[in-house]
Image (cartoon, rainbow, N blue to C red):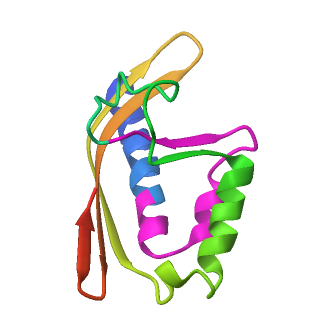
Protein backbone atom coordinates (compact mmCIF):
# COMPACT_ATOMS: atom_id res chain seq x y z
CA UNK A 1 0.00 0.00 0.00
CA UNK A 2 1.20 3.53 -0.77
CA UNK A 3 2.90 5.12 2.29
CA UNK A 4 0.94 8.40 1.95
CA UNK A 5 -2.36 6.55 1.76
CA UNK A 6 -1.47 4.44 4.78
CA UNK A 7 -0.53 7.57 6.74
CA UNK A 8 -3.83 9.26 5.83
CA UNK A 9 -5.78 6.18 6.89
CA UNK A 10 -3.97 6.08 10.24
CA UNK A 11 -4.69 9.78 10.87
CA UNK A 12 -8.30 9.35 9.77
CA UNK A 13 -8.65 6.38 12.12
CA UNK A 14 -7.35 8.50 15.02
CA UNK A 15 -9.78 11.33 14.22
CA UNK A 16 -12.78 9.01 13.93
CA UNK A 17 -11.72 7.19 17.12
CA UNK A 18 -11.64 10.54 18.94
CA UNK A 19 -15.09 11.42 17.54
CA UNK A 20 -16.50 8.06 18.63
CA UNK A 21 -15.16 8.51 22.18
CA UNK A 22 -16.82 11.92 22.41
CA UNK A 23 -20.08 10.66 20.91
CA UNK A 24 -20.25 7.88 23.51
CA UNK A 25 -19.26 10.20 26.37
CA UNK A 26 -16.02 8.32 27.09
CA UNK A 27 -14.39 11.50 28.28
CA UNK A 28 -11.56 9.94 30.29
CA UNK A 29 -10.52 7.82 27.30
CA UNK A 30 -10.74 10.91 25.07
CA UNK A 31 -8.51 12.86 27.46
CA UNK A 32 -5.98 10.00 27.49
CA UNK A 33 -5.38 10.57 23.75
CA UNK A 34 -3.57 13.81 24.58
CA UNK A 35 -0.10 14.43 26.00
CA UNK A 36 0.57 16.79 28.91
CA UNK A 37 1.74 19.52 26.51
CA UNK A 38 -1.39 19.29 24.36
CA UNK A 39 -3.52 22.25 23.31
CA UNK A 40 -7.07 21.85 22.02
CA UNK A 41 -8.38 24.67 19.83
CA UNK A 42 -11.76 25.02 18.14
CA UNK A 43 -11.63 28.05 15.84
CA UNK A 44 -14.66 30.23 15.09
CA UNK A 45 -16.84 29.11 12.23
CA UNK A 46 -16.72 32.46 10.46
CA UNK A 47 -12.93 32.44 10.02
CA UNK A 48 -11.00 30.12 7.71
CA UNK A 49 -9.50 27.48 10.00
CA UNK A 50 -6.14 27.80 8.31
CA UNK A 51 -5.92 31.53 9.00
CA UNK A 52 -7.69 31.61 12.37
CA UNK A 53 -5.39 33.17 14.91
CA UNK A 54 -6.06 33.06 18.66
CA UNK A 55 -4.47 36.51 18.98
CA UNK A 56 -7.07 38.08 16.68
CA UNK A 57 -10.11 35.76 16.83
CA UNK A 58 -12.30 34.49 19.64
CA UNK A 59 -12.12 30.68 19.60
CA UNK A 60 -14.97 28.42 20.79
CA UNK A 61 -12.43 26.38 22.77
CA UNK A 62 -8.81 27.18 23.53
CA UNK A 63 -7.71 24.72 26.22
CA UNK A 64 -4.38 23.47 27.47
CA UNK A 65 -4.16 20.02 29.10
CA UNK A 66 -5.07 21.33 32.56
CA UNK A 67 -8.16 23.06 31.19
CA UNK A 68 -9.08 19.89 29.26
CA UNK A 69 -8.94 17.89 32.53
CA UNK A 70 -11.10 20.51 34.25
CA UNK A 71 -13.62 20.43 31.40
CA UNK A 72 -13.90 16.63 31.58
CA UNK A 73 -14.34 16.69 35.37
CA UNK A 74 -17.02 19.40 35.10
CA UNK A 75 -18.94 17.61 32.33
CA UNK A 76 -18.96 14.33 34.26
CA UNK A 77 -20.47 16.03 37.31
CA UNK A 78 -24.26 15.97 37.59
CA UNK A 79 -24.07 19.61 38.71
CA UNK A 80 -23.21 20.53 35.10
CA UNK A 81 -26.87 21.23 34.38
CA UNK A 82 -26.29 22.06 30.73
CA UNK A 83 -25.17 18.45 30.18
CA UNK A 84 -27.27 16.58 32.74
CA UNK A 85 -28.82 14.58 31.30
CA UNK A 86 -26.23 14.73 28.59
CA UNK A 87 -26.84 15.82 25.04
CA UNK A 88 -27.01 13.47 22.09
CA UNK A 89 -23.91 14.31 20.06
CA UNK A 90 -22.56 13.05 16.75
CA UNK A 91 -19.24 14.06 15.23
CA UNK A 92 -18.70 13.61 11.51
CA UNK A 93 -15.14 13.70 10.18
CA UNK A 94 -14.46 14.32 6.51
CA UNK A 95 -11.95 15.74 4.00
CA UNK A 96 -8.93 14.35 5.85
CA UNK A 97 -5.71 15.60 4.29
CA UNK A 98 -2.25 14.66 5.53
CA UNK A 99 1.25 15.85 4.66
CA UNK A 100 4.49 14.54 6.09
CA UNK A 101 7.06 17.23 6.76
CA UNK A 102 10.63 16.84 7.94
CA UNK A 103 9.93 16.23 11.63
CA UNK A 104 6.14 16.24 11.88
CA UNK A 105 2.88 15.25 10.28
CA UNK A 106 0.38 17.98 9.44
CA UNK A 107 -3.23 16.94 9.17
CA UNK A 108 -6.37 18.85 8.24
CA UNK A 109 -9.95 17.70 8.40
CA UNK A 110 -13.45 19.07 8.37
CA UNK A 111 -15.79 18.30 11.24
CA UNK A 112 -19.51 18.64 11.71
CA UNK A 113 -20.85 18.28 15.23
CA UNK A 114 -24.55 17.74 15.78
CA UNK A 115 -25.87 18.30 19.31
CA UNK A 116 -29.46 17.69 20.40
CA UNK A 117 -31.05 18.10 23.81
CA UNK A 118 -34.68 18.49 24.73
CA UNK A 119 -36.19 20.54 21.87
CA UNK A 120 -32.92 22.23 20.90
CA UNK A 121 -30.52 21.10 18.21
CA UNK A 122 -27.31 22.73 17.10
CA UNK A 123 -24.95 22.11 14.23
CA UNK A 124 -21.34 23.24 14.47
- Quadrant where the C terminus is found in the figure: bottom left
Residue 30 located left or right of residue 7: right
Q: Residue 123 colored magenta?
A: no
Residue 117 located left or right of residue 103: left
> How many numbered marks appear?
0
Residue 57 located left or right of residue 55: left
Image vertical order of residue 123 relative to residue 119, above or below:
above
Kindly identify the residue that appears in the image at 47 percent across and 57 percent down.
18
Kindly identify the residue that appears in the image at 65 percent across and 72 percent down.
74
Q: Quadrant of residue 87?
A: bottom left
Image vertical order of residue 65 relative to residue 4, above or below:
below
Location of residue 123 in the rendering, given as x and y in whole percent from the top left corner: 24, 61
Q: Going by the picture, which residue comes out furthest to the top?
A: 102
Q: Quadrant of residue 44?
A: top left
Location of residue 113 in the rendering, given as x and y in whole percent from the top left corner: 30, 60
Image vertical order of residue 101 relative to residue 85, above or below:
above
Q: Residue 20 colored magenta?
A: yes
Location of residue 119 in the rendering, given as x and y in whole percent from the top left corner: 23, 86
Residue 1 visible to the viewer: no
Residue 89 visible to the viewer: yes
Location of residue 114 in the rendering, given as x and y in whole percent from the top left corner: 27, 66
Kindly identify the residue that appears in the image at 41 percent across and 71 percent down.
23
Q: Which residues are magenta?
A: 19-44
- Quadrant where the N terminus is found in the figure: top left
Kindly identify the residue that appears in the image at 47 percent across and 66 percent down.
22
Amino acid sequence: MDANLLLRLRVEDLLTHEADLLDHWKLDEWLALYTDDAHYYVPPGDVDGETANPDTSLFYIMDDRMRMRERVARLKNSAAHVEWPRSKVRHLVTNVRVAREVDCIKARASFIVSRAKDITSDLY
